[in-house]
């Protein structure tokens, strides 16, 4: 595929990963948006991007004339952009509401539903009762 | 004072009687097979199970299987009857008997299975049921621990064994045990090394060979009938059975003889030393069981017919005397309330019939004539002399272990029943049935000793023949004339008597030495178990600690690895040609917009700057769409980007700034590395993405657009006509998101409204 697009998508993915692992909710959200953009581009370019003509049909023809861009990934990406926008807007409302309600944008501060485990005694360990066993072996 | 006899009339329970009846019927059927099996006619039955893999539900009775069938059902009848009398409460009695019965069925399946996978299924069934039996007194922490220990040790060995069995079956091309030796006749034995080691792991854990011996004495937490059954005739003999079963396959392997001989000898000597140190009679017997298993392993290491015959005889001998002794100790326990050998003496007056049982069992164990044990021991010595490679080591081990057996036998018989009566009278009178069972078993040992022809040609010789694969020539007899084994026997008895009289001094010395070596299998088991559980706990805390950034980071790391697997796959690289010189200006522009935008988004200290970066990436993407013929997509992308900027700019002043969340430098470096890793992976994977693209579906839309949908923009036609329902769903998603956001934002105002 086009090397310049591969490089561009790689850069966007890297930025998305960096932002999504941030603790600030807005930056995380930006990461989600960037990742969505990168994925849309991947879907789009996987449909072969060498042809530059849009998939339109002339008024006197029954089918596109000559080589035109692949219409199918375009339709898929169009849907994905709109859905991604819906997701982003709703998530933005959630982030906004959460920040208002708790006064912080740090997701590590939002642990009421799933309290963070600390380095205490491990979960599964239980006291061994080997001492009361009769001396054996 | 002694309470009245406690055999409740209600011991006659339908379930208990039925299980005894079935065991008895199994024994009779087993007896009826004897003539046929001795003549070489082996009953076989099989059903197809996993046909595609060649796995069958197959059973076959040969001499070795028959020996075990008779032991399992015969001793099973006695143990079930004893258990019925042993358990006092009807509920416990039924549970005990039914579990024992289930165990008996699993063992029968194990020793008659003719298919490797069938065998493994029954093998695991014995492991699981033994867990329930060892932990029968589940109110006690020690019983639960012992049960779990047995389960983990034998279960782990069982898993190793499964791998070994599958390797073996794959190598041979058949899973039928009876066909394996012929199928592997031409195979280079060194190809079977791995399967041998794995199968030996299964056998050694099941049969408590050093260094896995520790679980067996701990399993004495079980009620007496369970110990008697599992540790005389069944469970622990399963490993020995499998060793005997694979003997024809592996006997010529260079590892077989040294491994079995050395581990068997070490186990036998170590366990007999340990047994002398015990003060609990039951634990003493448990260690002698380990010793017996070691001896059996040692003899199965050899291919000498006499050694193999000695092993098959000893399987029978040991099962008889060990069940007698275990059950006898159960009677003592019930009557006196203790099993401590230091407290017990002179019980002959209180328990006269049990005394007879104890002496018959103990003398058989010690190998005194005319008991069956004497024949077994003579054969063992003869077998040891016949092992050509290492006769010295095997004989020394056998004599040393047997001498200590003599001492143990004298402890459980002479010291316990003769002498001055002890004032241990805390228990209740045992039911008559409990007394009779060990007596009958002990008398069997005497009868077979006096008339060895009863078991010789009928049971022992066919079993040895099965192991060897060629007809075995053995003659069981009490008197073979004065020969080397007889001389060794005399030496053994003298040594044993010496050890018996020096016992207290010896144990004191051994305790002092033992105290200097705090390492035992039991301790190692504790450490390993604790480390495993702690490690699992720490692992969970580390990767599932409730920290979202860690979850996200780990997910991305895995995705990154997958990308590299795709990018650096082993098919010849089809890298796209990199054409820097011919880059178009708009290509450079979109690349630059996206690069600068991404950099701004991650590096910006202010929220609005980061938003500008986000928008720049969006515009760069729009440019790509536009220049590659996707006008509609470009327009949509641009409008969405604009809306996002507006929305974010509207709410961002009300959200705490980026500086409100502190990030340390190491965290940033870690995230940066991860981001570079995943991003580079994406680029490499995409460079491998090469045309041609299948345009079948696209061509259909292009051809059908005008005639069927009367539209000239193919993308629009796909969206609103051919895939209209999809678009309706998409619209619904946006509406739901808008409604949700509206409800969220409106809710805030409601809560702020003054009352």
Image: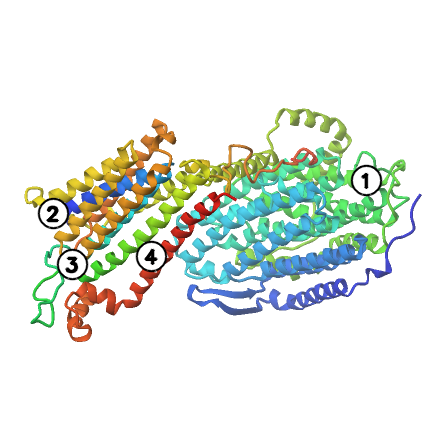
**How many labels, in total?**
4
Toward the viewer: A51 or B391? A51
Which mark is first along the chain, 2 or 4? 2
Query: Mark 4, chain letter?
Result: B
Could you say whether the residue bearing mark 4 is in a helix, strand or loop? helix
Q: Relative to B439, does residue B706 appear above or below in the rendering?
A: below
Residue B1 in sight in this render: yes
Which mark is first along the chain, 1 or 3? 1
Mark 3 vs mark 1: tell me if same chain: yes
Residue located 34% across and 40% down the image: A26
Query: Mark 3, chain letter?
Result: B
Residue located 47% across and 40% down the image: B546
Inter-mark Cα distance, 2 to 3: 15 Å
Residue located 38% across and 31% down the image: B660
Q: Is residue B438 left or right of residue B470?
A: right
Toward the viewer: A16 or B236? A16
């Amino acid at each position: 595929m086009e090397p310049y697009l591969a490089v561009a998508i790689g850069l966007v993915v890297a930025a998305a990963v960096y932002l999504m692992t941030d603790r600030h909710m807005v930056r995380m959200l930006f990461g989600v948006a960037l990742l969505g953009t990168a994925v849309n581009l991947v879907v789009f370019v996987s449909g072969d991007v060498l042809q530059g003509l849009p998939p339109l049909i002339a008024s006197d023809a029954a089918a596109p004339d000559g080589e035109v861009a692949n219409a199918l990934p375009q339709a898929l990406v169009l849907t994905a952009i709109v859905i991604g926008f819906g997701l982003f807007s709703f998530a933005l409302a959630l982030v906004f509401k959460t920040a208002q309600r708790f006064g912080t944008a740090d997701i590590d501060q939002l642990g009421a539903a799933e309290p963070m485990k600390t380095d205490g005694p491990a979960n599964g360990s239980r006291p061994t009762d080997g001492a009361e066993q009769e001396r054996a072996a | 004072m002694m309470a009245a006899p406690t055999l409740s009339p209600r011991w006659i329970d339908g379930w208990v009687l039925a299980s005894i009846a079935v065991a008895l019927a199994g024994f009779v059927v087993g007896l009826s097979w004897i003539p046929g099996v001795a003549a070489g006619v082996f009953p076989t039955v099989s059903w197809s199970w996993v046909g595609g893999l060649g796995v069958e539900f197959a059973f076959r009775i040969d001499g070795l299987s028959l020996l075990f069938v008779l032991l399992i059902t015969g001793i099973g009848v006695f143990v079930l009857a004893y258990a019925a009398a042993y358990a006092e409460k009807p509920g416990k009695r039924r549970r005990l008997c039914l579990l024992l019965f289930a165990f008996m069925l699993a063992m029968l399946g194990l020793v008659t299975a003719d298919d490797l996978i069938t065998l493994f299924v029954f093998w695991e069934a014995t492991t699981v049921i033994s867990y329930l039996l060892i932990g029968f007194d589940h109110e006690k922490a020690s019983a639960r621990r012992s049960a779990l220990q047995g389960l983990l040790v034998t279960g782990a060995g069982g898993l190793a064994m499964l791998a070994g069995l599958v390797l073996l079956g794959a190598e041979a091309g058949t899973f039928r045990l009876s066909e394996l030796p012929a199928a592997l006749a031409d195979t280079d034995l060194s190809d079977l090394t791995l399967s041998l080691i794995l199968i030996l792991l299964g056998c050694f854990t099941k049969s408590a060979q050093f260094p896995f011996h520790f679980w067996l004495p701990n399993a004495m937490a079980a009620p007496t009938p369970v110990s008697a059954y599992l540790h005389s005739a069944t469970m622990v003999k399963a490993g020995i059975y499998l060793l005997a079963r694979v003997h024809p396959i592996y006997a010529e392997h260079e590892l077989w003889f040294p491994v079995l001989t050395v581990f068997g000898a070490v186990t036998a000597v170590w366990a007999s030393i340990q047994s002398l140190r015990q003060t609990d009679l039951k634990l003493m017997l448990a260690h002698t069981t380990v010793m017996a298993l070691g001896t059996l392993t040692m003899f199965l290491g050899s291919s000498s017919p006499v050694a193999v015959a000695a092993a098959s005889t000893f399987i029978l001998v040991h099962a008889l005397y060990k069940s007698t002794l275990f059950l006898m100790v159960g009677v003592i326990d019930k009557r006196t309330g203790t099993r401590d050998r230091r407290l017990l003496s002179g019980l002959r007056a209180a328990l006269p019939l049990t005394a007879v049982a104890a002496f018959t069992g103990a003398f058989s164990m010690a190998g005194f004539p005319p008991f069956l044990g004497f024949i077994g021991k003579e054969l063992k010595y003869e077998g040891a002399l016949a092992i050509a490679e290492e006769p010295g080591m095997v004989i020394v081990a056998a004599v040393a272990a047997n001498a200590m057996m003599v001492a143990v036998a004298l402890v459980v018989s002479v010291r316990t029943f003769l002498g001055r009566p002890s004032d241990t009278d805390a228990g209740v009178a045992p039911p008559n049935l409990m007394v009779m069972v060990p007596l009958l078993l002990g008398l069997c040992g005497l009868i077979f000793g006096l008339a060895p022809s009863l078991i010789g040609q009928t049971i022992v010789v066919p079993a040895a023949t099965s192991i060897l694969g060629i007809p075995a020539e053995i003659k069981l007899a009490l008197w073979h004339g004065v020969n080397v084994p007889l001389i060794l026997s005399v030496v053994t008895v003298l040594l044993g008597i010496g050890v018996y009289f020096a016992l207290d001094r010896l144990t004191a010395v051994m305790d002092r030495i033992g105290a200097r070596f705090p390492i035992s299998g039991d301790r190692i088991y504790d450490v390993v178990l604790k480390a495993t559980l702690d490690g699992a706990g720490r692992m969970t805390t580390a990767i599932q600690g409730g920290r979202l950034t860690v979850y996200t980071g780990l997910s991305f790391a895995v995705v990154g690895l997958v990308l590299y697997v795709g990018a650096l796959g082993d098919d010849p690289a089809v890298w796209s040609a990199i054409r820097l010189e011919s880059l178009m200006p708009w290509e450079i522009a979109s690349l630059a917009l996206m690069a600068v935008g991404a950099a701004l988004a991650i590096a910006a200290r202010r929220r609005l700057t980061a938003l500008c970066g986000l928008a720049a990436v969006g515009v760069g993407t729009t440019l790509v769409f536009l220049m590659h013929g996707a006008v509609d997509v470009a327009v949509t992308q641009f409008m969405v980007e604009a809306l996002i900027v507006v929305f974010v700019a509207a709410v961002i002043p009300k959200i705490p700034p980026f500086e409100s969340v502190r990030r340390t430098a190491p965290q940033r470096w870690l995230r940066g590395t991860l981001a570079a890793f995943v991003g580079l992976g994406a680029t490499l994977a995409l460079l491998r993405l090469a045309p041609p693209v299948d345009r079948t579906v696209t061509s259909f839309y292009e051809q059908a657009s005008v005639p069927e949908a009367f539209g000239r923009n193919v993308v629009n036609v796909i969206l609103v006509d051919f895939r209209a329902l999809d678009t309706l769903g998409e619209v619904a998603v946006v509406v739901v998101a808008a409604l949700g956001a509206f409800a969220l934002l409106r809710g805030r105002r409601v809560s702020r409204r003054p009352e």
